[in-house]
Image (cartoon, helix red, strand yellow):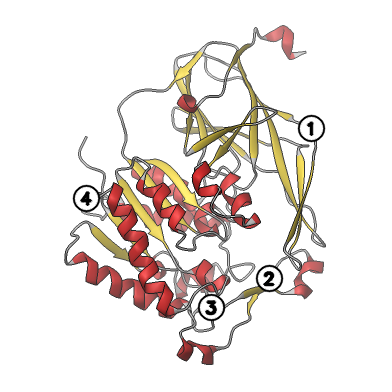
Amino acid sequence: MHEHEHTWITTPVTADILRGALDLERTAHGVLPHRLPARARAQCADGQLAMAESQPSGVRLVLRTRATAVELDTLPTKRVYAGAPPRPDGVYDLLVDGRPAGRGTVAGGNTLLIDMSSGTFENRPGPAGTLRFTGLPERDKTVEIWLPHNETTELVALRTDAPVEPASGPRRGVWLHHGSSISHGSDAESPTTTWPARAAALGGVELINLGLGGGALLDPFTARAMRDTPADLISVKLGINLVNTDLMRLRAFTPAVHGFLDTIREGHPTAPLLVVSPLLCPLHEDTPGPSVLDPGSLATGVLRFRAAGDPAERAAGKLTLTVIRDELSRIVRQRAADDPNLHHLDGRDLYGEADFAELPLPDGLHPDAATHRRIGERFAAHAFTDGGPLAPPPA
């Protein structure tokens, strides 16, 4: 029936109306936003990274329009974990002039079957669906549609009942952030309530979120992507994934951190750069990885993780969160002697013992929706306020 109510205008989805993506891939159906460039993706065949970087955390359509109705056809990819109950559909957030104005989901789509025990991924195709928002105010306004932070989303068609143009206006500082699944958004309620999105809104900055679930591994291609991405303010949150994967020992970790920061500095020699150490995670404070799924938890529907390493292995250079925090603090102190715009934040100032007592990590690793909001508020108060390490330059 909606065809009779509106005269629809279809607008191609192009980079000038999309923010937060580093690459736009043409597909058989439309376009797929990526958070790592093609050259980076070509250097790593890991299925986990491919899934994470194609999930559009922080990616949003931003339009100027008088439209009262907006439709977006998308082809989502739903994740199904073998043996676990179905996950909820990914959430889209609508903002009008920066204020929350609606929320929606798209059913259907492709299915990615993931077997955590064998580490295998299987794709099954499915149909596109439509996201619809109506009743928007009939005036010139900025409309933002934030894509689901945890659901790969191909953009098929954008329709409105009035013309759209890219949003302009005063340029805000661009904040480029890299981190793990917690920065990606893990169990946040929606894409604008992940901790980085919340912090960016409070700080008045434009977010580019390179939080990659399972993918904050000091990969050189990620550092080069950050080097080559225009940004005013930069932060890097490191640690938990290196323990989760048991990927490297202390001997490799220290030069890799230096190399990662060196590469970022090649493209951003003087930008404020904040290195954030891990949040409190009792599982791995003093016990090395890898993190493994507790098989008994699958049947209950609440996934839980445990630490499979042995604390005695720290003597052989195995990494724990405590080891990583000490080393990051030391590295930043050492480098800051020649780099006055380099700063350090202990992740336990964002989520520490008292927070864990009040808001424990439901699966042992990831904060819940309320905790995301708290971390975002704390980060903004620490980093973006006057005198903070990432205080935006005066307009």
* Residue toward you, 219 or 131: 219
**3D distance between C-alphas at marks 1 and 3:** 41 Å
Q: What residue is pinned by disc 3?
A: 284
Label located before the other in sequence (2 or 1): 1
- Give above or below for 281 relative to 379: below
Q: Are marks 4 and 2 in contact (CB under 8 Å)?
A: no
Label located before the other in sequence (4 or 2): 4
**3D distance between C-alphas at marks 3 and 2:** 14 Å
Label 1 SS: loop
**3D distance between C-alphas at marks 4 and 2:** 42 Å
User: Which label is found at residue 127?
Assistant: 1
Residue 382 position in % (x across, y down): 31, 57
* Residue toward you, 40 or 123: 40
- Give above or below for 10 relative to 75: above
Q: What residue is pinned by disc 4?
A: 270
Amino acid type, label 3: His
Amino acid type, label 2: Arg
